[in-house]
Image: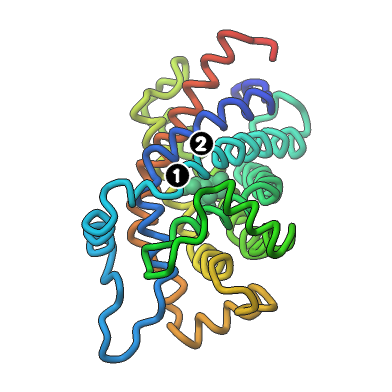
Amino acid sequence: MSEKAAPISPLKNFLAGGFGGVCLVVVGHPLDTIKVRLQTQPAVVAGQPPIYKGTVDCFVKIVKNEGFKGLYKGMAAPVVGVAPIFALSFFGYGVGKKLVASHPDQQLGIHQLFVAGAISGVMTTVVMTPGERIKCLLQIQQGQGAAVKYAGPVDCAVKLMKEGGIKSMYKGTCATLLRDVPASSMYFMTYETTKKALVNLSGNSGTGLSPFQTLFAGGFAGILNWAVAIPADVMKSRLQTAPEGTYPRGVRDVFPALLREEGPKGFFKGIAPVMLRAFPANAACFMGFEVALSFLNWAAPNL
Ligand SMILES: CC(=O)O[C@H](CC(=O)[O-])C[N+](C)(C)C
């Protein structure tokens, strides 16, 4: 007999998703900083050592030269920016699930979950692109020898608007879509299917998931999200941090340039910190989401 699905509330998803996003940033930001530093460091010149030899070297150099606070550089922007991004992402997923379901109680299949995730990916791009542009610019300043240009996220946003208007804020939109549409599909589909598999395995369908199972399903969703997102993420970070005019045709220029300069492995730059961060950060995110959702279901059952 097919189980009756819980009614979907995009509004509750929005609020709980925002809380999940804050949990994700607190746990994952240091590794995100390392990822962006590795992704955007200049190509190695023959005979000269790279600025950072790898994840551990990058971590040690940041802590030595900038202190622990260097790892948390640019975190104000994601905390303020990621909460709405994740709120919108989980809201979009809720809307997507409603759109693909033929009736409100339907248990969605793997393909429907995939499409609902893609809808979420498109919706988040509106806030994800400027959020990522500001975050990446802040994360790379100082670390690679350049003078400090932006005092913080607001200063960065104001300067980008003054210098290049809304077009500059939305630099990297195509790369963000290329990253987030497949990534969000993978993310939500993996979380739901892993959850279902774990419940079936343990036979605890009456009591739902244990905290450990939620953490595992969330962490695994994060890993598969990044497994499909990383090549587009490298292109996005490059594009969004390059000096004006470097890649006039966006992805169409950054793709061949990266391939020419660094070969196929260039598209996987920063994969170690990405994967190190993916599991704990997304485990924390889904845990925060589920806790907030349970609270909302208790406090406002009809929301
Ligand atoms: C690419 C990205 O932002 O992935 C999010 C998870 C993470 O580790 O930041 C998930 N999502 C694309 C659904 C926002």
**Residue at x 64%, y 10% (from the top left corner):** 301
Q: How far across and down, in percent of the image, does residue 300 sit?
A: 63, 10
Identify the residue position indicated by label 2 in the image.
21
299 up-or-down from 10: above or below:
above
Question: Is 217 in front, or is 272?
Answer: 272
Left or right: where 145 falls relative to 90: left
Element at badge 1? loop
Left or right: where 55 falls relative to 79: left
**Residue at x 67%, y 43% (from the top left corner):** 116
Q: How far across and down, in percent of the image, does residue 124 sit?
A: 66, 46
| Residue type at the position of mark 1 | Met
Left or right: where 259 falls relative to 26: right
271 up-or-down from 44: above or below:
above
Question: Is 202 in front, or is 34?
Answer: 34
Identify the residue position indicated by label 1 in the image.
75
Question: Is 18 in front, or is 180?
Answer: 18
Tell me which corner region of the image, top left, top right, bottom left or bottom right, holds residue 211.
top left
